[in-house]
Amino acid sequence: MRPIQVLNAIVFGSAVAITFGLTGVLIIFLVLQREQPQMSAELPVLMRAAGLFSLLALAAGASLYAMLKELPWRWAAQVAMWLMVTGIALSYWPQ
């Protein structure tokens, strides 16, 4: 594996793990929101985070696949993945 592929795999694995964790928390929030009304206030933020990391996992997975198979669109997928990483970092960066 080339270094860029290893880095791609790390981003992909991290994004999938974060997405899995956020989705689990989202399910718990949906189940418990009737008993704990204050959870409803956090639901939009949680859904946004789960959506962003799902998109990152998708972009990183496509990029990793394209890099491993040396497909012609691999560099476009790589750019899309890094734009997603940058966008997520900027969205969580303190103002």
Image (cartoon, helix red, strand yellow):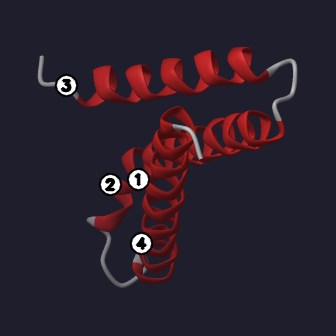
Q: Residue at x 46, y 40 (%)?
A: 7
Determine the CA span between mark 4 and mark 3.
Answer: 22 Å
Q: Could you tell me if the residues under marks 1 and 4 are in contact, i.e. CB atoms within 8 Å?
A: yes
- Which badge, 1 or 4, is on the more N-terminal residue? 4
Determine the CA span between mark 1 and mark 3.
Answer: 17 Å
Depth check, mark 4 against mark 3: the one in front is 3
Q: Disc 1 marks which amino acid?
A: Leu
The x and y percentages for residue 54 are 59, 48
Q: Could you tell me if the residues under marks 1 and 2 are in contact, i.e. CB atoms within 8 Å?
A: yes
Residue 93: mark: 3
Q: Disc 2 marks which amino acid?
A: Glu
In the image, is 70 to the left or to the right of 2?
Answer: right
Determine the CA span between mark 1 and mark 4.
Answer: 8 Å
The x and y percentages for residue 13 are 51, 58
Residue 46: mark: 1
Residue 42: mark: 2
Q: Could you tell me if the residues under marks 4 and 3 are in contact, i.e. CB atoms within 8 Å?
A: no
Q: Which residue is mark 4?
A: 25
Q: Eyeballing the image, is 56 above or below 80?
A: below
